Every structure is written in structure tokens, then in C-alpha cells.
Image (cartoon, helix red, strand yellow):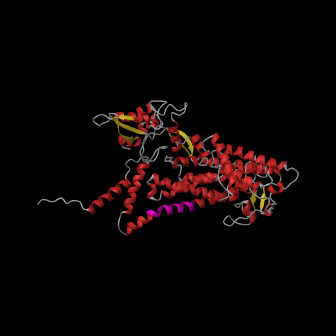
Amino acid sequence: MAHRRHAPTEHTRLLQDDDEQQLMATSAVGERLPYNDYTTIDWLHDLVKDSCRYRYVHSRKGVRYAVLAAFDSCSGWIAVAIIGSITACVAFVVDVAEATVSDWKLGYCTTSPLLSREACCAGTTPLLRRTDVTEGCDAFHPWSTSYWPSFAIYVAWALAFGLISSSATMLTKRSLPAVAAKDEDKLDANAASPPVPSGKALYMAAGSGIPEIKTILSGFVIPNFLDLKVLLVKAFGAIFAVATGMCLGKEGPFVHISTCVGYLVCKCFPKYKDNGRKMREMLSAACASGLSVAFGAPIGGVLFSYEFPNPLTRDPGDVIIKNLLVDCRNENSSTSFVCRNETRTDGRWDYIAWLVHGLITKLVLTIITFGTKVPSGVIIPALDGGAFFGRLIGQWITSISPGIFAMVGAAAFLAGLTGEIEYVVPHMIAILVAKWTADAISSEGVYDLAQTVLGHPFLDNDHALQLVQAYGTSPKHSMSFSVSNNTDANPALVEVLIPPVRTMNEITVEVPPGNKVPRALLEQKLNQLHARGLMDAGLVLVQDGMLQGYLAGMSVLTNLYGI
């Protein structure tokens, strides 16, 4: 008896579609796992993959799948709540520990050595609200009452803290792999392979981490930069780095720490773990939480030996800003060091000298310490320098409180708005002048310059567009934008984006009429790409002058060698 083939019903078609979507959501086709250093994620594939995953999760029927769909919709909120909570806890520990360690340079608390001078004198614990430290505190015992012994002990502690911080940072050293031959380009971490030649050394916990995070958010991959080990070393190193008194802050390390927390938390959610595009969405939110805790907690440490003689620069960075923004017309501030000196009638040139000294030391030491291999940030020192400059200018304009000038100066140095609406206009003027001056010197910001100095790749769409628009309009334009190198080429033509002749020859594969490309030719092309350092490039397939397709280099490598 013959069997009749039944036409597929709508139900069976839906089941087939679900199966296909599930396979696509978990497929690694077009994906390069794991990525090498400084390659990019596949944005398009990750977008398609997430769309298929979303349809598969939200198209299923039943209570179980309804709960899964609801959890999938709420997973982002759950993740950011966990990220924010953990980041706040880490920031609290770092801040309290830094305050205590920093005060060890001056003395110790007789009631508990683990309390900072402020908490010791106020008789509180870090969990309780802090109060201003009163003059003369019997509970906090200084190492010495003489200036020079105190100075020597201060410097000794600062050097010790610096050694501890830098030694911890050295534990995160990693050599980025140089371009290797085909047999060394193994993607499977468990597979036996010859040693990969090392490239430049990168200390994962050094600096602020913001240039590297910008690189990661733009789609590039720096393996191990957001690991748990880096998080712990970054937090530990930041405590002792800031406690040295060097001209640095914790705001940059907090951004790196929060991004590490975001990465580790999101790895627990399959929605983000298996999708580089979605992961970077959460990392952006994690960066915001890092900035929040950085400016919600006291920042800075007692400054280094060059700032110790200056009574205006002995306090932590946030306290310096607070002291310089004070309004001496307020009776509650009349007893502060700043107000006592500004109410003098003897010319107060020594006080003005302290302001000049503070401005110069802040700027010079910020330049020096920003490149050191310790966890550090640059925002609070910039605010300090701007506040010193503004307060200095305010000494000769008596109609307005010098604190307003300090506030405007701090905002101008950071090019950000703070303060009341009444002073929006001076803020805007100062920020515009600062922006114009900075643009006249360089069109790149400090983190953009740091990214360039460190050699991290970054795809700047605005910069690329400017190059295209400017091509052929300047006699000094680059000769490498067009294959023809025609100076009269129309900047609106696509040929402006075509690489030089040599690069085009190396990435182009001529497909014969039989549509079969020799294996030896593909191996040769891959070796040429790797020899040029184009680890994330691919091959252009051309037949009879017509574009047939594009093959990513990692995909060719995977299919050739089965890795």
C-alpha cells in the first residue's frame, strides 16, 4: 500500500521555524570563538543571533515559556541592579581602606588603627555619617610633633605604598600575541600548539583603564582585561596608589572596576554571555555606575612630598576642592584657612604664593603621575588645578566671591557644568574658551591621546568621515586613500575608501570559472595578511571583475585547519 505524503501543516511549519531559530541562536557560523587580541566582534552576526534568540524565547506557548520570556525581558534590569550594588560595595571598601591607609602617613588612631583620622576623631565608624574633624584630636596620635621627622615619615610611607601598588600591578602583566604563522593561529585554548610569540606588554591594572574600555566598547577584544584577578588587583592597587599622595584619583579605576563587575555579572546571563553586542550594552551601563560611585564617595589622598609643605594641598583631592570653593561671606566658613588669609589686610602675598604653588604642583604632578603603572585617574586632579587657578584669579576681583571663580575654573578644566543657574553664563564662557583652546592644541581628548600612546585600536566614525570629505580638497592630503592616487578624485566616490594597491592585491582572490580556489592560494593569502598584522582582515572574492563575496580571515582559518 502506497503512503501518501501529507503537505506540511501550519503547526509543523511553526515547529520547523522554532527549530531553525533555536539552531541559529546557538550557532557559531560567522562567529570567531574565542577572539584573538585586537580583533573585533561580529556586530551583524550578533544582531541576527539575538533577534533569533528573542523570537524563539517569546514565541513559545505555555506558562513555563511565559515565565522565561518575562525573565528575559527583565534580565537587563536585574543585571544592572546587581552591577550597581556590587560596584557600590567595592567602592565603599576601597574608599574606607584608602582613607585609613592614607592617614597612616601622619599617625594612627589609638582606639583602633583601622580607623581613619576623621572617623577616629569623630568617634564614629565608616558605616555612620561622618562629621567634620575638630582641631586637636587626642584619639589620633601623630608620629611626631616636629616638622622634619613628620616629613621624613610621610615620604617613607608614601614610597612604601607606591611600591606595594606598583608590585601588585605587575601581577597583571600580559604580552599581547604577535602575528604568527598559520600553525600557531590555534583558536582552541585546550588544543596543544607551539608557543605564540609575544608582542607588546600590557599591564591590565595600570592607569585608569578608560582608554582600554573605550577600545572594548567600540567592538575590539582585549582578553582578560575584565577578569576577576584584574578587578581585585585594581581595587587593591588603587587603595595604595591614592594613599601615596601622588596627584591622581580613583575615578578612572572605579570605571574599570565597575566594568569588570558588569562583565562578570553578565557572564551569568546567557543573553549577554554568548553575544558580544549585547554584552557591550551592559558594559556601557556598568561604566556609568563606576562614574557614579567615583563622585559619590570621597576621592583623593594626602598628597606627595612636593605638596606636603603647602597647607592648601595636604588634604585629599575632594577636600581640596571643598576648601577652595568656600564662600568666605558665610560665617560658618570664616575660621577656615582660606578665609582667614583672604580677610587679611597686609597684602597676603604668602597666601597668593601658596595658590600659585598649588596650581603648578597640581599640573606638573598630574602630568607625571598619569603615565605611571599604578591604578590612577585624572579627573579629580584636573578639578583641583582648575579650582586653584580660579581662586587665584578671584583675588583681584573683589566684587564676586573667589569661590565662584574656583568653581568656574574647576568646571573649565574639566569642561563640565556644575553650580547654580545664576552662574551658568560664566561657566559657559569658561568652558567654551577651554574647549577652543584645547581644540587649537589638539582635536583629541586626554583619553583619546592615551589610547593612541598605548597603541589601542579605535574606530572613529567621525574621523573617517572627515577624511573622506577632505580628500582631494587639500594639497597635503594622503596619497593612500585611492587606488589611482588621483588628486582630482571626487571625494564622494567610493574609490576614496579603497585601500592601497598592495593591500588590495593581497586581500583579493580571483575565483576561477570552476568556482574552486586552490588551498595553497588561500594559505598564501592568509600568510600575507598575518605578515602585515591584519589579524582581523578577510579576503575579497572576485570573478571576472565582479565582487562575489567576502570571507573573514578567521572563518577561512577555521575551515582550512579545522580549529
For this orientation, the residue located farthest to the left is: 1
Residue under the point 38% across and 63% down: 58
Residue 243 visible in the displayed image: no
Residue 123 visible in the displayed image: yes
Looking at the picture, how far across and down is residue 98, in whole percent?
67, 56
Q: Quadrant of residue 182?
A: top left
370 left or right, relative to 174: right
User: Which segment did they paint magenta?
Assistant: 72-86
156 left or right, relative to 294: right
Say if the magenta span includes residue 76: yes
How many marks overall?
A: 0
429 above or below 471? Answer: below
Residue under the point 49% across and 43% down: 38
Say if the magenta span includes residue 242: no
Quadrant (top left/top right/bottom left/bottom right) for the N terminus: bottom left
Q: Quadrant of residue 555?
A: top left
Looking at the picture, how far across and down is residue 140, in whole percent?
77, 61
| Chief secondary structure of the magenta portion | helix
Q: Nearer the viewer, residue 406 or 248?
A: 406
Looking at the picture, how far across and down is residue 498, in whole percent?
44, 36
330 above or below 226? Answer: below
Looking at the picture, how far across and down is residue 251, in whole percent?
63, 53
268 left or right, relative to 342: left
Residue under the point 35% across and 56% down: 21
Quadrant (top left/top right/bottom left/bottom right) for the C terminus: top left
522 left or right, relative to 427: left
214 above or below 544? Answer: below
